[in-house]
Image (spheres, grey):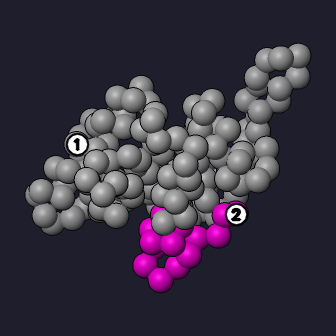
Amino acid sequence: MMDNQSRSASVKNKCIQIKNIVDDWIGIYQSDDEFSKKQYKLFVYVDETFKVLGCLVAERTSTAQQFAYNEENGTRQLLITDKEKKVVMGISRIFVDLEHRRKGIATTLLESARKHMIYGYHCNKNRLAFSHPTSMGHEFAKHYMQKHNYLVY
């Protein structure tokens, strides 16, 4: 786990470097300054040669909404309820190297984040939200949460 608010310049730089690689793969942009201002924690999965195989970016958040896809007629329709739910943690990004998917890395990262994001607190699944996921992220969230609807922030 790496904290982007660390006092160590090398840790901050490594956090930004890993985040930028993940952002490129996912296709999103967030400036390094914006990333440094928020309190994110990076959970990184490395192999025995210290190659990064996966990364999860988590942040503290307090509210989320119920989310589901309506897949009638072969089209996807995003459904978000107006009612807000209380949560404690949001998953901003999760990425696993293409060659290492479906090996439990994303699940391991998420379990680690739930256990270590907040010192002394193990986050229950119902207090966890995902940022608006890609189609692959949606499939992972459904599998991990063991239901078709989950919380987004």
Residue at the spot x=60%, y=33% of the render?
Answer: 136
Q: For mark 2, does the 10 Å Cα neighbourhood hold few (<14), some (14 to 19), or many (20 or more) residues? A: few
Q: Amino acid at mark 1?
A: Gln
Q: For mark 1, does the 10 Å Cα neighbourhood hold few (<14), some (14 to 19), or many (20 or more) residues? A: few
Rendering coords of residue 74 (x, y %): 83, 17
Q: Residue furthest right?
A: 73
Q: Residue furthest left?
A: 9
Secondary structure found at label 1? helix
Residue 4 appears anywhere in the view: yes
- The quadrant of the rendering that contains the N terminus is bottom left
CA–CA distance in space, label 2 to label 1: 31 Å
- Which residue is disc 1 drawn over? 17
Residue at the spot x=45%, y=35% of the render?
Answer: 99
Residue at the spot x=47%, y=41% of the render?
Answer: 100
Rendering coords of residue 31 (x, y %): 27, 35
Q: Is residue 9 left or right of residue 6?
A: left
Q: Residue furthest bottom?
A: 120
Which span is picked out in magenta?
A: 113-126
Q: Quadrant of residue 16?
A: top left
* Residue 72 included in the magenta stretch of the image: no
Residue at the spot x=56%, y=53% of the render?
Answer: 104
Q: Amino acid at mark 2?
A: Asn
Q: Is residue 43 left or right of residue 129?
A: left
Secondary structure found at label 2? helix
* Residue 119 included in the magenta stretch of the image: yes
Q: Is residue 99 left or right of residue 64?
A: left
Rendering coords of residue 30 (x, y %): 33, 35
- Which residue is disc 2 drawn over? 126
Rendering coords of residue 26 (x, y %): 44, 30
Tell which circle, 2 or 1, labels the residue nearer the N-terminal end.
1
